[in-house]
Image (cartoon, rainbow, N blue to C red):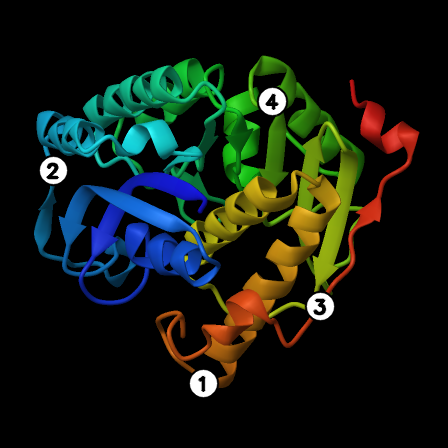
């Protein structure tokens, strides 16, 4: 059975971080060992919350405890997301090194949670720089949104070609696979949501209809589903299509129910048998070359 260590935030109410990714992974047949970086009552988008960030040494202690059970030898991937503090970033890198020591074939998948176009940076000071200066070179897969991609590469993107070039640039700096969410540009219409994947299998783009609202935790689900499918098939187009289909189906169910939180449990069948399916398009050589 595929097994993943997931180090990211946890909330008691709603679905974000591990409280989003763990169930999505489990529902697709992945064994998950969650390690929390914060323990909050709810996600911070509500404006107020209770709980605290977990000290880095306690996060590391949990990783060591998992290792003492012999589990890391059978771990296929490390997944990380919301850090809480820059110090936890070092734990992420140490965990990646430890897991790779136990299983050299293990994959390090990093979702560089730090901000978005409509909010700017919401991660604590020092975290964005840690992602850029330390995690990029260590990760095998990275899944930034467009805002995060621009920060990580120092590029401004206004067209699809420029987004592809930025993703290729990020890939040259470390990760073998880059998945970019929330892709927009002046030459792309407003009538679709887009995911872009760049990797050994080329450059692929998938479009889904627009849903007129924001969904907290959707990025965590997207990364989890992409990682699960990638570990299963190793096919970039297949992983992108499966991720887009399942994620859109979940978000559509949430929107139709007019719920603030993801309908993760109620719409769980969409994670494995989505009601909507989408096909990825391979971009031409001009777009995929990037400069």
Task: Pick whichever of labels 1 and 2 is earlier in the sequence.
Answer: 2
Give how far apart the Cα atoms at labels 3 and 4 are. Answer: 29 Å
Task: Pick whichever of labels 3 and 2 is earlier in the sequence.
Answer: 2
Q: What residue do we see at 24% from left, 30% from top? A: 70
Please, is residue 138 above or below residue 39 in the view? Answer: above
Task: Pick whichever of labels 3 and 4 is earlier in the sequence.
Answer: 4
Q: What residue do we see at 16% from left, 26% from top? A: 64
Residue linked to disc 4: 170
| The label number, if any, that marks residue 16 in the structure image | none
Q: What residue do we see at 14% from left, 49% from top? A: 39
Q: What residue do we see at 56% from left, 32% from top? A: 149
Of the residues tagged 1 and 3, which is closer to the observer? 3
Say few, some or many: other residues with alpha carbon within 10 Å of mark 4 (under 14 / 14 to 19 / 20 or more). many
Question: Is residue 126 visible to us here?
Answer: no
Q: Nearer the viewer, residue 205 or 28?
A: 28
Question: Disc 3 on helix, strand or loop?
Answer: loop
| The label number, if any, that marks residue 277 in the structure image | 3
Residue linked to disc 2: 54
Give how far apart the Cα atoms at labels 1 and 2 are. Answer: 34 Å
Question: Disc 1 on helix, strand or loop?
Answer: loop
Of the residues tagged 3 and 4, which is closer to the observer? 3
Question: Is residue 182 visible to us here?
Answer: yes
Q: Position of residue 29 (x, y in %)?
A: 45, 57
Residue linked to disc 1: 257
Q: Is residue 3 left or right of residue 161?
A: left
Task: Pick whichever of labels 4 and 2 is earlier in the sequence.
Answer: 2
Is the C terminus in the top left, top right, bottom left or bottom right quadrant?
A: top right
Q: Is residue 176 left or right of residue 140?
A: right
Q: Quadrant of residue 264?
A: bottom left
Task: Pick whichever of labels 1 and 3 is earlier in the sequence.
Answer: 1
Label pair 1/4, CB-CB below 8 angstroms: no
């Amino acid at each position: 059975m595929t097994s993943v260590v997931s180090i990211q935030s946890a909330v008691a109410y709603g679905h974000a971080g591990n409280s989003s990714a763990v169930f999505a992974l489990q529902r697709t047949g992945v064994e998950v060992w969650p390690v929390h970086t914060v323990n909050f009552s709810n996600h911070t988008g509500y404006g107020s919350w209770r709980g605290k960030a977990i000290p880095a040494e306690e996060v590391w202690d949990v990783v060591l405890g998992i290792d003492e059970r012999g589990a890391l030898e059978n771990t296929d991937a490390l997944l990380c997301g919301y850090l809480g503090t820059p110090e936890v970033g070092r734990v992420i890198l140490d965990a990646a090194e430890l897991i790779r020591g136990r299983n050299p074939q293990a994959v390090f998948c990093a979702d560089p949670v730090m901000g978005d176009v409509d909010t700017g940076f919401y991660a604590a000071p020092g975290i964005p720089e840690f992602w850029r200066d330390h995690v990029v070179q260590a990760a095998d897969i990275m899944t930034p949104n467009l805002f995060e991609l621009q920060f990580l590469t120092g590029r401004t993107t206004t067209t699809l070609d420029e987004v592809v070039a930025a993703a290729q640039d990020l890939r040259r700096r470390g990760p073998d696979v880059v998945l970019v969410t929330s892709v927009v540009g002046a030459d792309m219409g407003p009538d679709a949501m887009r995911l872009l994947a760049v990797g050994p299998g080329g450059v692929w783009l998938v479009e889904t209809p627009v849903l007129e609202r924001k969904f907290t935790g959707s990025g965590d689900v997207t990364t989890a589903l992409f990682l699960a499918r990638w570990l299963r098939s190793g096919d970039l187009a297949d992983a992108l299509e499966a991720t887009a289909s399942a994620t859109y189906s979940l978000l559509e169910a949430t929107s139709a129910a007019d719920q603030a939180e993801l309908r993760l449990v109620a719409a769980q069948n969409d994670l494995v048998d989505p009601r909507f399916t989408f096909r990825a398009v391979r971009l031409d050589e001009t777009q995929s070359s990037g400069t």
